[in-house]
């Protein structure tokens, strides 16, 4: 386990750097577009629509576009670099979110919220929180379980995760809709 801690730390650092890069880009787009927060009626309506549409998508009620790169990080890096460097490379690629496949459309909600803030610090914070949610499950590798057991559990629970994801998106979408039209 101690051998893995530097890799785990570098992976987290990669996610953090990815959040800064992506959050800065999204916040700058929002600032250039003149957005000043998602607490406006229009901003809340946009977030409501994204939450409701992608929630319905996750629950298999309708299909909406899911634009993403259908790939993961390059595996050949494992042969060329040390484990901590590979952890950092993987963390950065995953932390930039759109460079790899993300199984949750919560990414689109976080992206819209980050753009709508119109500020770099808030956009970075939103993406950092999203990335933290993606990074923390890696901590399971600190437990005395095998990769095979983890992969098996994930495979058995993937459908449930999609249902929970859909429910979260619908709940957020409904909450944003209530706030938008209140």
Image (cartoon, rainbow, N blue to C red):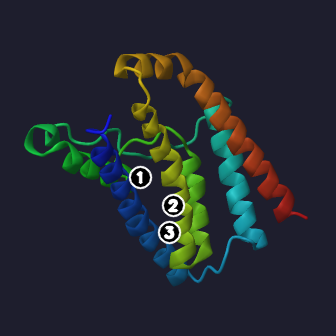
Q: Residue furthest front?
A: 2
Q: Quadrant of the N terminus?
A: top left
* Residue at screen point 52% across, 43% down: 65
**C-alpha distance separating marks 1 and 2:** 9 Å
Task: Name the residue that disc number 1 marks.
Answer: 97
Residue nearest the viewer, comparing 52 with 150:
150
* Residue at screen point 60% across, 54% down: 109
Dots 3, 2 in contact, CB < 8 A? yes
Q: Looking at the picture, does residue 49 appear above or below residue 63? A: below
Residue nearest the viewer, comparing 107 with 32:
107
**C-alpha distance separating marks 3 and 2:** 5 Å
Task: Name the residue that disc number 3 marks.
Answer: 124
In the rendered image, residue 114, in percent from the top left (x then y), is placed at: 56, 67
In the rendered image, residue 78, in percent from the top left (x then y), is placed at: 16, 38
Q: Looking at the picture, does residue 60 appear above or below residue 6? A: above
Task: Name the residue that disc number 2 marks.
Answer: 127
* Residue at screen point 50% across, 83% down: 32
Dots 1, 2 in contact, CB < 8 A? yes
Q: Quadrant of the C terminus?
A: bottom right
Left/right placement of residue 163 relative to residue 120 reads: right
Tell me the element at label 2: helix
In the rendered image, residue 31, in percent from the top left (x then y), is placed at: 53, 82
Tell me the element at label 1: loop
**C-alpha distance separating marks 1 and 3:** 13 Å
First reached walking from the N terminus: tag 1 or tag 3: 1
Asked if one can make out residue 62 in the rendered structure from this viewpoint, the answer is: no
* Residue at screen point 50% across, 69% down: 124
Q: Quadrant of residue 141?
A: top left
């Amino acid at each position: 386990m101690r051998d893995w801690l530097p890799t785990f730390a570098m992976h987290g650092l990669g996610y953090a750097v990815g959040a800064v890069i992506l959050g800065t880009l999204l916040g700058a787009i929002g600032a250039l577009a003149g957005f000043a927060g998602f607490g406006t009626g229009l901003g809340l309506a946009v977030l409501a629509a994204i939450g409701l549409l992608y929630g319905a998508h996750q629950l298999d009620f309708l299909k909406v576009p899911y634009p993403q790169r259908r790939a993961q990080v390059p595996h050949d890096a494992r042969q060329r670099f040390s484990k901590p460097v590979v952890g950092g490379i993987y963390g950065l690629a995953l932390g930039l979110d759109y460079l790899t496949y993300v199984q949750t459309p919560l990414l689109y909600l976080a992206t819209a919220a980050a753009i709508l803030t119109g500020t770099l610090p808030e956009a970075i914070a939103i993406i950092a929180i999203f990335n933290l949610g993606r990074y923390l499950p890696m901590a399971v590798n600190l437990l005395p379980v095998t990769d095979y057991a983890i992969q098996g559990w994930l495979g058995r629970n993937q459908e449930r995760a999609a249902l929970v994801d859909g429910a979260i998106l619908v709940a957020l979408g409904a909450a944003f809709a209530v706030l938008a039209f209140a």
